[in-house]
Image (cartoon, rainbow, N blue to C red):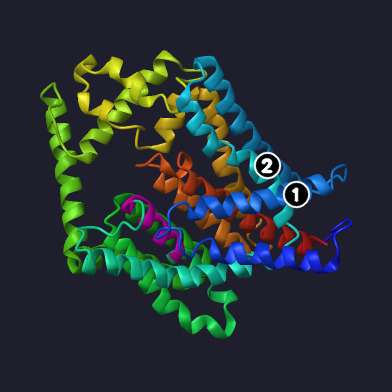
Amino acid sequence: MSEGVMTPALARIKEWLVYALIFLFPVAGVSVRHWFSAIFVLLALISLWDLVRQWGKRPVLLREEKIWLWLCVVFFLSFLVSSWVNGWTQQQNRALGVDVRYLLVVPLYLMLRHYTAAGRCLLAGMMVAAAVLAAQAYYDVEVLRLTRAQGSYSPNLLGPVAALVVVWLLSSWKLCGKLRWLLPPLVLAALWAVVMSGSRGAYIGLLAMLLIWCGLFFKGWLRAPAFIAVLLLPVVAYHSFTSLAERVDVAVSEVNVYFEQLEQGEYESGGSINVRFEMWRAGWMAFKDAPLLGIGPNNYKETVRQYVGVNGLSEQVAQHGQAHSAYVDILMARGLVGFLIFIVLLFYPLYFFMKTRQASPATAIFGVVHIVGFAAFSLTDASPFDKGNFVAIYLLCMSIFLSRHMAAVKQRLV
């Protein structure tokens, strides 16, 4: 790595600092507020320092890397354009602190490409994170007597993070060597944290990631029993954990009630699932009124108030700050332009990982399950691409997974 005028000692300190921050990144994010965001910002600041020192030196990037980085920049620009068109307010000032991460990921990615041990540091941090997640879940449920494990934020962060850790650890089976024996208990620990979170979005994401993981990890006749085992996992969990069974039963009941009410011509009231359907209806109404550039980021609550009562739309939709689906939220906030950029941003790397997985299966699997997880979490929650902690996880881990895979593929092609 070219360090310019930096002394060898300072370069070494910087290298160990970067590796330490990457190791720490997954460890305590659900237990310490702003942990994910703070580490992401620190790494971004270090990368900006690198960018300034090496100004004028053109980085050598492969076409796929350039495309993904440009997509991040253009997605950030869609935030600026939609905000400007709809009138910049204090709401957009708050949202800017999150969306600027899509811009900061450019120097961050350029820096991480040179840190070849970044993937191993992140994996080591994931192993510690599994134990921390289980401890946090135990503390919340058994000591504090909370109905759901939530950590410093909410079950909707703890659950998805635990689900990601489960599949990340499973994906590292071939990379752990002598430490492989640690993986089963750590996977079970993180899996227990997922169950205790009661996050239905985490359940959906975990199942989707496990199915994809089975298809990529197992070969030949082993795939069939692996798929069967994954499909039986929800059944076993349902009959083993009362809290999980109650959450599932409530969800099914709410869906039935909602559609029964719609058949009768009006929506009265209901739980979180019912309200989500109503929020998605409100989002569609808002999109139809501003289809190209949307209503502006963070303008959900102010906008949907005007639709309350239209076609029986419930007033409960205006009691939330987002549409509880990243797809609906981005479609209504940034319009069709921003939504299409988002879809390509999310799924283009998936296409590339799948296309080149034979060149380096061990690195491709991380990128694939990472994207599938975030795509699934986003079905019922806007947070994965709307909240700072989630965006930090998505961008930093994607940067590491993509850069390591690109290096492996490039080495294979040379």
What is the x, y in percent for residue 270? 15, 35
Instruction: Say if residue 186 shows up in the picture.
Output: yes
| Left or right side of 361 for 255 | left
The image quadrant where one finds the C terminus is bottom right
| Left or right side of 113 for 101 | left
The magenta-colored residue range is: 154-165
What's the residue at 81%, 69% (across, down)?
9
What is the x, y in percent for residue 239? 18, 66
| Left or right side of 414 for 358 | left
Which residue is under mark 2?
Answer: 69
Q: CA distance from mark 2 to mark 1?
A: 19 Å
Camera-nearest residue between 314 and 41: 41
Residue 129 included in the magenta stretch of the image: no
What predominant SS class does the magenta segment belong to? helix
Mark drawn on residue 168: none
Mark drawn on residue 49: 1
Instruction: Say if residue 211 shows up in the picture.
Output: no
What's the residue at 60%, 32% (across, down)?
76
